[in-house]
Image (cartoon, rainbow, N blue to C red):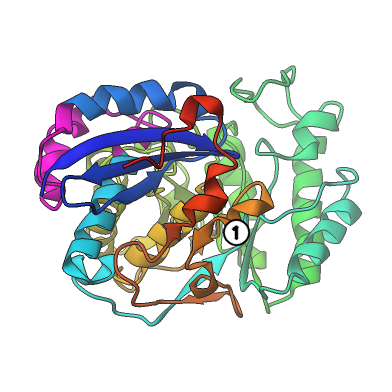
Amino acid sequence: MKIKDVRCAIIGDHPVIRITTDEGIDGIGGAESPRNQPFFKPQIQYYRDMILGLDPTDVERVLLHIRRVGAFKPWGSGVSAIEIALWDIAGKAAGVPIYKLLGGKIRDRIRVYNGNIRTPFEGYQPEDFAKNMKWMKDLPQNFSIIKQGITFHGSPMVRDMPDFYYGDYVPKPMYPNRGLMTEKGFNLTVDCVIAMKEVLGDEVGLALDCGPGMAVSDTLKLAQALEPYNLMWMEDTITGDYTPYVHPDFFLQVTPYTSTPIHTGEQVYLRHGFKELIEKHAVDVIGPDPMDVGGIAELKWIAEFADLHGIQMAPHGTADGLIGLAAHVQVGATLPDNFIAFELPNGKPDWWYDILEGMDNLVVEDSHIAVNDTPGLGISFRVDEAKQYLSEEDAGFFDD
């Protein structure tokens, strides 16, 4: 079997690739959305010419041709998308789900957490966070862990509260707003966490997405102040989302000195980016994203290495789309017992649920998704339904 073509399209909010072969078996992959869209197609085109004619079932051999030219989020998305599509082909060719090719499953259902299905805040006071959390707790998926943005991450605090921190907020999505919190901002943060915990009690775990943007001193002070509330983790406080570095030495000024678990890693590319974080025990929990880290086999390798060092796994996935959801399920079935849960992605717009076959196998019940036995990723496009959402530029995406 040989790779015949590698194609890319933007379908709704989601960048998607399709690898075709000379034997008529195809595989699909995708990237985080929507911020990866402008450069994703040129990235895939660049990799395409490196892998045409190779055997797609030799996944590692194919990746050796392209892996070295990826980088931290979002520049690892192309390699990750191709890796997932290759595993989809390999599974279909063998007539087995991908997890069988990764060593087999050790669990029949996989826990997911909610950091993605949200409702807008009405303000930045504790009662606003409590109301928002009540809405999330009451969702029909009955999530056992909920992650909420606070301080510098998607929070009304940094956007709307006067004097939240010693800096001037810049309302641009990639601008690195960061700085030392004021006493007023710090105290409000603690009060908002307490308000959310009063809603959740000990029935639902609370994780906080905090940045990046927090100072090391604020991170330690906040983690220690929140110790009585038994958080699942504090995520990306110092570095993280879209920062092209890790700074394990900064986290080492926090993690050993608090019982609140410290989490990072969604932006990291490849196992090499996690090496120091894990070996130095710089954090308690890592969260690689299969759509950025280099794919699902790469994520599994990192999980095994973390397990050897007593570090937990809670993979990131908020914007991975439904192809990402299927990929999470396949690799999540194989991860060691340091796995906590993965972050549930969804499809945007909602018609994504109508253009994929197999979505009935990916339903969340009581915060879990059952592992199914469909070959490959377990999903495929309903081509006639999907074609109507292709742009003129992408009209040939499904052509043989």
Q: Position of residue 73 (x, y in %)?
A: 41, 32
The residue located at (24%, 29%) in the rendering is: 48
Q: Is residue 266 above or below residue 361?
A: above
* Mark 1 closeness class: few <14, some 14–19, many ≥20 residues within 10 Å: some
Q: Is residue 236 magenta?
A: no
The residue located at (10%, 39%) in the rendering is: 54
Provide the secondary structure element on which disc 1 rests: helix
The residue located at (30%, 51%) in the rendering is: 27
Q: Quadrant of residue 367?
A: bottom right
Question: What kind of residue is marked 1?
Answer: Tyr
Q: Is residue 76 magenta?
A: yes
Q: Position of residue 62 (x, y in %)?
A: 13, 40
Q: Is residue 339 above or below residue 287?
A: below
Res 293 visible: no
Q: Nearer the viewer, residue 166 or 347?
A: 347
Q: Is residue 337 above or below residue 23?
A: below
Q: Position of residue 352 (x, y in %)?
A: 59, 52
The residue located at (60%, 34%) in the rendering is: 214
Q: Nearer the viewer, residue 197 or 393?
A: 393
Q: Nearer the viewer, residue 212 or 324?
A: 324
In what quadrant of the picture does the C terminus appear? top left
Q: Quadrant of residue 312?
A: bottom left
Residue designated by label 1: 353
Q: Position of residue 74 (x, y in %)?
A: 43, 31
Q: Is residue 187 above or below residue 328?
A: above
Q: Which residues are magenta?
A: 50-79
**Position of residue 40 in the picture relative to residue 387 (left or right):** left
**Position of residue 235 in the picture relative to residue 348 (left or right):** left
Res 45 visible: yes
